[in-house]
Image (cartoon, grey):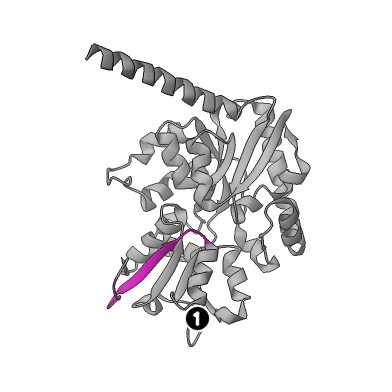
Amino acid sequence: MKRFAKLMAIVAVIAVAAAMAIGFVACDKNEGLRFTAPEGTPALAMARLVSDNGSIGGEKINYAVVSPSNIAAEMASNKSDIVIMPVNVGAMQIKAGAPYKLVSIAVEGSLFMVGKKDGGNTITFADIKGKRIACIGNNGVPGLVFRYVMKNNGIELISSGTPTGNQALVQYVADGAEAKELLAAKNADFAVVGEPAATQFKSIQALGINAEMNLQTEYRNVNPSANGENYPQAGLFVRTELTNNETFMNSLFDALAASKAWVTSNAAAVTEYAKANLYQSAVFPAASIPRCAINATRLDEQTKSRIITFLKNIMPKDPQQNDINWDLAKEQIF
């Protein structure tokens, strides 16, 4: 028994040392800091930084764009120093002890349900009944907002079988590309995707998309306390020690503001730039840029409260169905 206890103590020491080593890798002054975002609009929030800001506040920056399915690991493994990811996922990781702070809403809500319908260009809740829906981001903000809106409009979501009555069949997918495949194969009637995918899908003649539901509007309709404001979709999370560096943080927000200004003023040039600097498969139709809802400004107390209210609405419980006290977590997250 003593030998086992000694062995476990050694294992614990090794584990702690490994965790510390991982934490220090991303902050290695020789390697520079790592700034990561997932493909899509979150990557657009840092667009011009990739070409214009090789250093920020005296710190060398290495930029990376990864698959949406891999973004959570950037914080979970302490791999990135700055990361854009779903607000709820990052907040939960901080609650679990990740050494980061949420410093900005990188992207406000930019989620739409798109599809084909006869008569009119607006998808209603009556249209959804009995239909099949592909939805991105099961455990992220997209999936949570989708379920919140459906539940509050009397739509029961099922994962198998044939939907009847007020039911709709939902299939969660990894990204917009997979949602597009289901639409093309006629294995889904509607798709819940973010921008720029929603606008891109409309331009694909073979899909025949002619209608949409604005999930930002529907969120506000079932949550009057939103007071007409959008909801936070992707957050900008920064390693805690960096948030204490005022020079660095000022430079970071200056760079983000300049990037946003360029993107919003040069909508027609964004796709070409993104293909060359972000990821090769990037497509950002000019019409999608205003709907991408890039923010990336400093959080004030009012916005922090808006984020907490949003998290209380869409994620009152953790995956194990335990209640989450988001009010208590506020000081930890910000």
Q: Determine the residue positioned at 49% across, 41% down.
A: 73
Q: Is residue 1 magenta?
A: no
Question: Residue 262: x percent and y percent?
Answer: 75, 53
Q: Determine the residue positioned at 52% across, 80% down.
A: 121
Q: Determine the residue positioned at 58% across, 72% down.
A: 201
Q: Determine the residue positioned at 71% across, 56% down.
A: 274
Q: Residues within 10 Å of mark 1 (few under 14, many from 20)?
A: some
Q: Which residues are magenta?
A: 161-175
* Residue type (three-letter) at the residue carrying disc 1: Lys
Q: Is residue 124 left or right of residue 107?
A: left
Question: Residue 240: x percent and y percent?
Answer: 54, 29
Q: Is residue 95 left or right of residue 157?
A: right
Q: Residue furthest bottom?
A: 119
Q: Which residue is more in the foreground, 73 or 253?
A: 73
Question: Residue 152: x percent and y percent?
Answer: 33, 64
Q: Which residue is more in the foreground, 332 or 132?
A: 132
Q: Residue furthest left?
A: 1
Q: Which residue is more in the foreground, 151 or 76?
A: 76
* Residue 29, placed above or below residue 261: above
Q: Quadrant of the N terminus?
A: top left
Q: Which residue is more in the foreground, 256 or 275?
A: 275
- The reply to whether residue 246 is in sight is yes
- The reply to whether residue 152 is in sight is no
* Residue that carries the numbered disc 1 in the rendered image: 116
Res 188 quadrant in image: bottom left
Q: Is residue 179 left or right of residue 33?
A: left
Q: Residue furthest front?
A: 3
